[in-house]
Image (cartoon, rainbow, N blue to C red):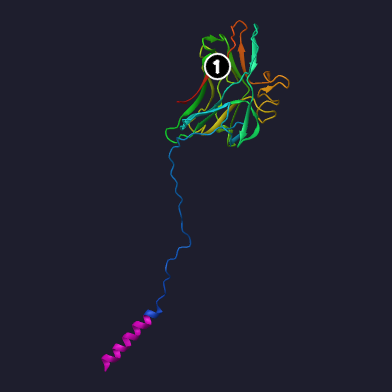
Amino acid sequence: MKKKVLGTTALLAILAANFALPITASAVPTSLKSEGHIEYIEDNGTNPPTDPEDPGKPVDPEEPIVVNPDGGTLSVDAVTNLEFMQQKAVTTDQTYFAKQVTVKENGTVKGTRGNFVQVTDKRIDNRTAWKLSAKMTKQFTAGTNVLAGSTLTYTNPLINGAGTDKDLFPKLGTGASSFTLTESGNEVDVMATDAATKGFGTFTVEFGNSAGYAGGTATDSTGTPNATDTNLIENGSVQLYVPGKAIKTKAAYTAEVLWSISETP
C-alpha cells in the first residue's frame, strides 16, 4: 500500500511541477525582407533621331536628316545634310547660309531647327571618355569640277540632351564655338567628355536655334528662307564660303563632312 501511495504522490508532484513551468512563446517575425533583381546587357541597336530642342522626343527620319543604320553602343546616330540652295554663278566671293531643318513627329511639323548632329553612348563595359570630331573629306565637286578653296564654317553650337544634370553632358571642344572645315582635311574636336562617368545617353549639337530657345541665341539663327526669294537663306549658323575665282559649271555640287565619335583615355 505504501508503494501505491508514494507512487501516486510522486506522480501528482511531477504533474504539479509541470503545470507550474512558464509557457515559452514561439518566435514569430514582425517583418520580412524581399529583393528585386535586374541584369543588364549592352544594347547594340540603332538610336532614332531626336529633337535637338526637345531632348528625348523622336522626330521623323526624313531628309535632310540622315540616320545611321548600323547602331552600336558608341555611335553617331544622325546628321543633317546641308542645303545651300540654287545660286547664281558670280565672279565675286560669296558666303551662303545652310537652310534650316524642318522637324516632324508622326507627320506633324513641330518646328524648324538648326542643322545638327546626334550621338549616343550606352556602353556599360570598359567605359571611357569620348569625343566627337568633324572634318571635310570631300570638297564641293560636280564630276571633275571642284569649287577649289571653298570652306564650311559652323557657329552658334548648342549641346543638348535629356536630364537636368548638365555637369554630366559633353562640353564644347576648344575652339569649337566657331570653327571652319577646309579641303585640307583639318579635324576639329566639336564636343567631348572628360571622364568615363559622364556622357552616358543621347546628345545633340545643334548649330543655331529657334528664337529664344534657352541657352541659345535670342533671335532665330537656324537659317531662314527669305520671304520673296527662297534660295536666299538668312540668319544661319552654317556658312559656305566660295571664292569668286572658283570656276562654276551648271551642275549640282556635293561635299562631304565626316563626323566621328571615338573613345579617349
> Observer-nearest residue: 185 or 171?
185
Disc tally is 1
Q: Position of residue 61 (x, y in %)?
A: 56, 31
Could you tell me which quadrant the N terminus lies in?
bottom left
Looking at this view, is 164 or 186 the one in front?
A: 186
The part of the image, by quadrant, that contains residue 160 is top right
**Quick one: quadrant of the C terminus?**
top left
Q: Position of residue 85 (x, y in %)?
A: 63, 18
Residue beneath disc 1: 254
Task: Give the answer, above or below, for where 134 lies relative to 1.
Answer: above
Say if 38 sits above or below 72 in the image: below
Q: What kind of residue is marked 1?
A: Thr
Callout 1: 10 Å neighbours few (<14), some, many (20+)?
Answer: some
Magenta stretch bounds: 1-17
Q: Residue at x 58, y 17 (%)?
A: 179
The one nearer the camera, 183 or 158, is 183
Q: Residue at x 39, y 76 (%)?
A: 21
Q: What secondary structure is found at the residue carrying circle 1?
A: strand
Instruction: From the viewer's perspective, tell me whether residue 116 is left or right of residue 32.
Output: right
- At x 55% / y 16%, what residue is drawn? 254
| 257 in magenta | no
Relative vertical location of residue 51 with respect to residue 87 in this rendering, above or below = below
SS assignment for the magenta stretch, majority:
helix
